[in-house]
Image: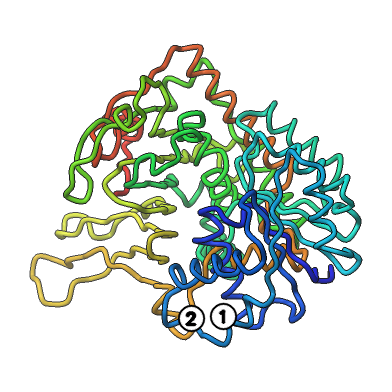
Amino acid sequence: MTAPSEKLLLFGATGDLSQRMLLPSLYGLAADALLPADLRIIATARSAHDDAGFVAFAEQALRRFVPSERLNEEALASFLRRIAYVPVDASKEDDFAALASAVGSTDKGLSIFLSTAPSLFEATIGGLARAGLAGDGVRIGLEKPLGYDMASSRHINDAVAAVFPEDRTFRIDHYLGKETVQNLLALRFANSLFEPLWREGGIDHVQITVSETVGLEGRVGFYDGAGAIRDMVQNHMLQLLALVAMEPPAQFNATAVRDEKVKVLRSLRPIDRATAGTHSVIGQYGPGAVAGGAVPGYLDELGKPSDTETFVAIKAHIDNWRWNGVPFYLRTGKRLPSRQSEIFIQFKGVPHSIFDGRGAVLQPNKLIIRLQPDENIRLMLMSKEPGLDRNGIRLREMPLDISMPNAFADTRRRIAYERLLLDLVEGDQTLFVRRDEVEAQWEWIDAIRDGWAANAMKPKPYTAGTWGPSAAIALTERDGVTWHD
């Protein structure tokens, strides 16, 4: 087991991610005595704060974003005493020297959380190396975006690998820190109930939906260059698909789990120039209404013409023995009717109904794993309705729920970054993404995008507040499948 780091270097410390997620996560870990008692936090960004100025900034962020019932004054004061601040401009070598002086020795471990603009990535990595902040006791956590295609991803990963070996590189996908995502592994591999059915003989199809009600929300520069497939599918959704579809790992450790995930990603059937038009749909939202309020279209928000997709639906297949013939439908988009992330698994129906002709209509069992906004696992089962009926047995589809907040009411619901930051500090890579996973994901995504370009596919318009273009409905209905909304 790797020893925990005694220091944490937090880049981008004045940004929105830091204020909303990272600082509250670190406070939560410290308040629960999960961080090493002597862990120091060195925060850095371009803003010209001194220690006292940044501590005041951090306190303001914590009072704003940590629920009041969790904000303990003594714990807050103790946490703030851990923090120092050093301003760093990645283009200035002297700034890294000042940072190294503030960090001091890394003999007892340093963990770096790097969240920076892609244009500053190489300069930052190089600056860390030249300042002596990349030695054997240093590991680095990398927040996306890490490239926009295979070539740029390799370029970034090569720059990282020149300084940090793979066993000290932690690529972050915050979805993997969600409790319900981790619970998917427990559901599959800690219970004997599902495993015999978790294959082509028992499952009809799988749907993965990540829907957002928001539009650009201040991400104009990044999002218009990325689109829905690179923003959501390439990372979050393919990671969810891999966890659903992977074979049982021999052990629950970083190597075994990630070995199985990469096998799935390499087994994805390519969607290329010949199949992009039949296996994918892209859309772009126009004006409409969300949550009862009028919202502008994407082009109105952007202020210029654009062919960037804000919605994508894909029919995927995994070409291996377990999943032969089982379609995986992926769907994500902005300005959709509701905010939700869920995995929907429809099992095959019973091979023969003994209730035919007696007023009973059987529905296939369904497993719904909801990741947000609420965390919930629901199994839909057929059950007899109470009462007497001379015409036969009346059946009804009934839910069997495991609501995370209710089932574990005595356990605080944690931010996904709490798990990931703690694992970074402790050196556990299980919930982080390995380079070969990233490259397998990009290989599949790049082929789809090449197919779109070769076929001159343009985003189909859809009204904000709806579930995307009508072609997305047709994508599933051709197979007799309906999206689970």
Name which residue lies at 68% across and 61% down. 43
Mark positioned earlier in the residue sequence (1 or 2): 2
Residue tagged 1: 76
In the rendered image, the vertical position of residue 72 relative to residue 474, given as above or below: below
Which element is circle 1 on?
Answer: helix
Q: What is the quadrant of residue 280 in the picture?
A: top left
Dot 2 lies on which element?
A: loop
The answer to whether one can see residue 371 in this image is yes
Residue 221 lies, in percent from the top left, at: 48, 33
Q: Position of residue 458 (x, y in %)?
A: 38, 18
State the CA–CA distance, disc 1 to disc 2: 7 Å
Which residue is at 36% across, 19% downward?
Answer: 305
Check residue 71 in the rendering and tell me which mark sits there, or answer none: 2
Mark 1 vs 2: CB contact within 8 A: yes
Task: Out of 101 and 5, give the one closest to the viewer.
Answer: 101
Q: Residue at x 23, y 71 (%)?
A: 384
Q: Is residue 183 visible?
A: no
Left or right of residue 70: residue 195: right
